[in-house]
Image: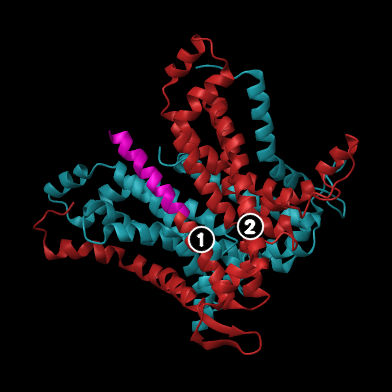
Chain colours: A cyan, B red
Amino acid sequence: MTRNGIPALIFHVLVMAFMLAPLVIVCLVAFTPENTLTIPIVSFSLRWFAEVFRHADFMQSFWNSLLLAFLAATISVGLAVPVGLALTRFQFPGRAFLNGLFLSPLIVPHLVLGVAMLQLFSMIGATGSFWWLVGSHAVVVTPYALRLILAALIGSDPSIEHAAQSLGASDFTVFRRITLPLMLPGLSGGWLLSFINSFDELTMSVFVTAPSTVTLPVRMYMYATESIDPMMASVSALVIAVTAAAMLLLDRIYGLDRVLVGQR
Amino acid sequence: MSAPGATPIARWAPYAMSGPAFLLFATLLLVPLLLTAILSFSQFDHHSGIKAGVTLQHYAAVLTDEYYHEIFLRTLRLSAVTTLICIVVGAPEAYILSRMSGRWRAVCLLVVLAPLLISVVVRAFGWSMLLGREGLVNQLLELAGIGRQRLLYTEGAVIVGLVHIMMPFMIVPVWTSLQKLDRTTEQAALSLGASPVTVFRRVVVPQVLPGILSGSLIVFGLSASAFAIPGLLGGRRIKTVATLIYDEYLHELNWPLGAAIAVILLIANLLIMLGYNRLMERRYRRALG
């Protein structure tokens, strides 16, 4: 192991500071007692957090987003489990196409997805429908669930399943007792990653939400383009807290480094 | 794996298992994209809205009008500069990270990569506070005797925000290719009298070039279609392709024109990603020998 020199470490500290700066400033300003965006130096206050909890629109959007992310993650994992099994345990014509299709939301810009879904929703009169919004989020987060589930299935040895089968276990028993437990970390990791990505999704949601279904990121975007006060910082701090909690769980269940750097 | 002489059930099983997901993706991905492509050829005027008939006028407008040229060029410029900064900062940073020891490395890697999972709106808002008129950066500039500058709602602010969002996408692929690096080559160069900077430039960089390249493609593609950062840090003056599409759809209500620009953006993105996949495949083939 060669060591980093002093210039390298200074460079490194600057990069770290750059990466952390906007998050730290948000969390500090969230505690200001003042009316303007100031960093509290002498006194900290929860005033703006109280303000957030009294703000009906922000609270409604917060619950919208939480429910939306919960449903979208659950649907995407529910769909991705059989897809993952089909892709890893069978060879069939169209397999590469399906694999590409289910991972494609990663390479289609969310902006394009947003306008495309807006077009569909306005044609079939689904604008403002919460369930169609859930469907659109499920599409966008399915690749995240599928990738972790695929990694878990590829990593597990199919000969264990064959052994159980040859010992007389039914297909369902094999799935319940062997396959499912083996893919559980990938499955729950995939759910959490899908949840985080749905909870944070802005660009597509800007197009497909109606006033009654506005999600938290969209509400924050609209708010930030019009006015800037410390309440925005408090909402941001709350979002960071929710995301950090999900990340902590993700780290315990699956390993954050594996999710962030990719599958080993 | 199903054997060649599989039972009919096994032959249909994978399709049945992918069926529900396919239905969702067909309804909410394939059909909408197709509708948008069709919409981009529809006639439109500002009084009566969308009319029957096929036209190339929207594509022609985008290709000939100076106004759109400027926006496309600005988007390309912002993405290119962002990519360049991510290379110059991200590649050395990944290298420094890879040379740290266990615990510190894990913590620092987390600090660099975890922002990836935190909402873009939050990070953009953080930057708008830092770069605002009364922001921390301006306070520091005043202390330094330079005086307050207009930082927010400039191309510079957009680039700073984009670099912050994109940095993890550069560090990860470089980090991955560094993991495969043979460390003895560096020691050999050092023992032959090369300076650390020379070792990095002449020994390390050529070996991680594929990582830098694939990182660059991702960063460029994502920057070109980024919406929240130019929207919040560029304001109304610094329009990019993404905010242009937003305006055409939600303010001008000229959906066919917006659709045409969205189709162009999608095709450009798919070409970049195709290049990325080609690159990855070639790497795998070489790795396999």
Q: Give the amino acid at mark 2.
A: Leu
Rendered position, B63 above or below A201: below
Helix, strand or loop status at disc 2: helix
Q: Chain of mark 2?
A: B
Instruction: Say whether mark 2 and mark 1 are on the same chain.
Output: no
Helix, strand or loop status at disc 1: helix
Counting from the top left corner in percent of width and height, residue B28 is at: 44, 71
Q: Residue B273: within the magenta?
A: yes
Q: Residue B108: within the magenta?
A: no
Residue at image position (45%, 56%) is B271
The mark found on residue B73 in the picture is 2
Magenta stretch?
Answer: B272-289
Rendered position, B52 above or below B145: below
Depth order, front residue of B51/A26: B51
Asked if residue A217 can be seen in this view, the reply is: no
Asked if residue B117 can be seen in this view, the reply is: yes
The mark found on residue A70 in the picture is 1
Q: Is residue B280 left or right of residue A226?
A: left
Residue at image position (47%, 18%) is B186
Counting from the top left corner in percent of width and height, residue A39 is at: 83, 44
The mark found on residue A177 in the picture is none
